[in-house]
Structures are given as structure tokens and as C-alpha cells.
Amino acid sequence: MSPGPNTVLSEREGRVAILTINRPDKLNALNDQVRDELLAELAKIEQDDSVGVVVITGAGEKSFIAGADISEFAGRAPFDQRHAMRSPRIFDVMSTFPKPVIAMINGFCLGGGCELSMSCDMRIASEKARFGQPEINLGLIPGGGGTQRLPRLVGMGNAMRMILSGDLIQAAEAKEIGLVDLVFAPEELRAKTLELAAKIASKSPLTLKVAKEALRASEKLPIEDGISYERDLFCLCFSSKDKEEGVAAFLEKRPAAWTGR
Ligand code: COA
């Protein structure tokens, strides 16, 4: 069978890789092909030292990702669905990816799209974006981590309201409850997101990786264990060339030249 057109576009801007889900006629709904292509692109980027940060977005004006492709659900048997949800799952790959991943949310951010954005390290949205977990309207519940990640970000009451009602919320409310970090006018979204991504990508890749690992550990560990883990990772940084370089650059009043070692 022909693989069909690419559903994920990959471009580079300096040290930032931009991945665009490219099914605008279906509001960038996530199907098997999109998931496979996203995994393949991320595997390439992981090995590519010229990329420091990944930005993920949706093609077109209207949608980031309008959820899982509902047409794949019709008549599907549980074991087939289980196969479709096999590991590695895109959500887990993104949350544990060794480089920062930013969701640039240009429109509808629904269901699996909202879950995918929550697996990213930061969410930056257009004022026009709308967010929701509407699975309840299909006789389903979120299946990409929504029942777990959403309450951690927005609190139990807000997560219950969104998941049980299926209602969509505007970007301003998403910001107010902590679902998104920054909101910009649609025409500013790309430039502002890439500005932040480029700044982050200019840091030591090794130190970014360790910082993300420490932050992600806070989602799993009791605070005492997390603080102890942070101390160990902090001390591990003392074995890196980049720590020597960063400290020397400060003392010599010059910019640091990172090597990622
Ligand atoms: N899966 C498959 N196709 C989808 C889709 C999805 N999650 N979301 C949108 N589409 C398709 C529509 O079927 C339509 O295709 P068509 O032109 O071949 O009929 C196309 O994308 C455009 O969507 P449309 O519904 O016409 O746009 P709209 O502006 O009227 O409504 C939404 C936008 C987002 C409110 C509406 O598309 C919607 O409710 N989508 C489903 C969201 C959802 O339940 N996501 C969770 C899935 S688990």
C-alpha cells in the first residue's frame, strides 16, 4: 500500500526543529500514520546534535490537533484499539524526550491533541485556540493521559469539569487555569514561540537534558526524594565540560561556548 502524503512536515530554523501535523482538511486529527511519522521524526531529531529544541504545531489556520481520528474508532474491536495504542506511545516519547518540546497551539486543541500538548514541556497558544477533552460526547474517556495529566496541570475541579462536560474553553481561560503558559495574538504566535525556542536551544544541550529530567522527576517523586535526586543531578553537572565553560565564561565576562559535553 502506498504510504500516502507526509502527514508530518519537518523544518529547521537554526537549532529549532518545527514539526507540523499536516492534515488540515481533517483539522490535523491524529491517525496511525501521523503517530508513526511523528515517532520517526522524533527518533531522527533525538540523534541530531544540530537540534536543541522541538516545536510541534498544526497546519492551517484553524486547528492544532482536533483529537484522535474518530473515523478509526467506528466498529473497531478492543484488541485492535489496544494495538493502535501500543508502546512506544507518542505521549510518553514526548514527555521523556531528551530535548525540550514546545507545543505551539494555533487552533483547536482537543482530545488526543490536548493530551499531546500536555505531554510537551510548554504550551504556547494563539488567542484563537480552543481546548477541550470532548471524548465524553463519543461515549469515551481520554485515552492519551488526559485523566492523569490534566488534573496535575489545572486541578481536579477544572479537570473534572472539562472531561465530564466535554465543554471547550478559550485560550484566556486555559491560561488562567494553567493549561497553557503563554498566549499571543495569532499573527505573533510563530515569532514569539520561535524566539523562546531559539533562546532555550542556545543553552547547553547536556544541561537542558538534565534540567528536564529533574523537572519531570517532580511529577513522580515525593518531594524529599525529588530534592535528593536534584542534588545528585546538580553534582553530576560538575563532571561536565559545559559546567567548567559556563563558570569560566561568567568569570571572564564572555559568552559561553557550549559543547554539550
Ligand atoms: N477525527 C476525524 N475527523 C475530524 C476530527 C476528528 N477528531 N475533527 C474534525 N474532523 C474532520 C471533520 O469530520 C471534517 O471532515 P469532512 O470535511 O470530511 O466532513 C473536517 O475535519 C472539518 O471539521 P468540521 O467538523 O467540519 O469543522 P467545524 O469547524 O464545523 O467543527 C470541531 C470543528 C473541532 C468542533 C469539530 O470538528 C469536532 O467536534 N471534532 C471532533 C473533536 C473531538 O471530539 N475530538 C476528540 C476525539 S477522541
Image (cartoon, helix red, strand yellow):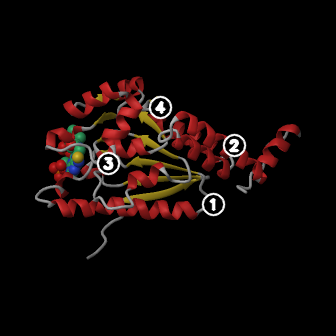
- Cα gap from disc 3 to disc 4, whole angstroms: 21 Å
Alpha-carbon distance for marks 2 and 3? 32 Å
- Amino acid type, mark 4: Asp
Residue bearing the label numbered 1: 49
Q: Give residue 104's position: percent from left, percent from top.
A: 44, 42
Residue type, numbered disc 2: Phe
| Secondary structure found at label 3 | loop
Q: Quadrant of the C terminus?
A: bottom right
> Residue, x 30% and y 25% (percent of image)?
157
Instruction: Mark 3 and ligand 1: say if the CB distance to the nearest ligand atom is below 8 Å.
Output: no
Q: Which residue is mark 2?
A: 234
Q: Which residue is mark 4?
A: 181
Dots 1, 2 in contact, CB < 8 A: no
Q: Nearer the viewer, mark 3 or mark 4?
A: 3
Disc 1 marks a residue whose amino acid type is Asp
Mark toward the viewer: 2 or 4: 2
The image shows residue 152 at horizontal and vertical percentages of 40, 33
Tell me which label, 2 or 3, sits earlier in the chain. Answer: 3
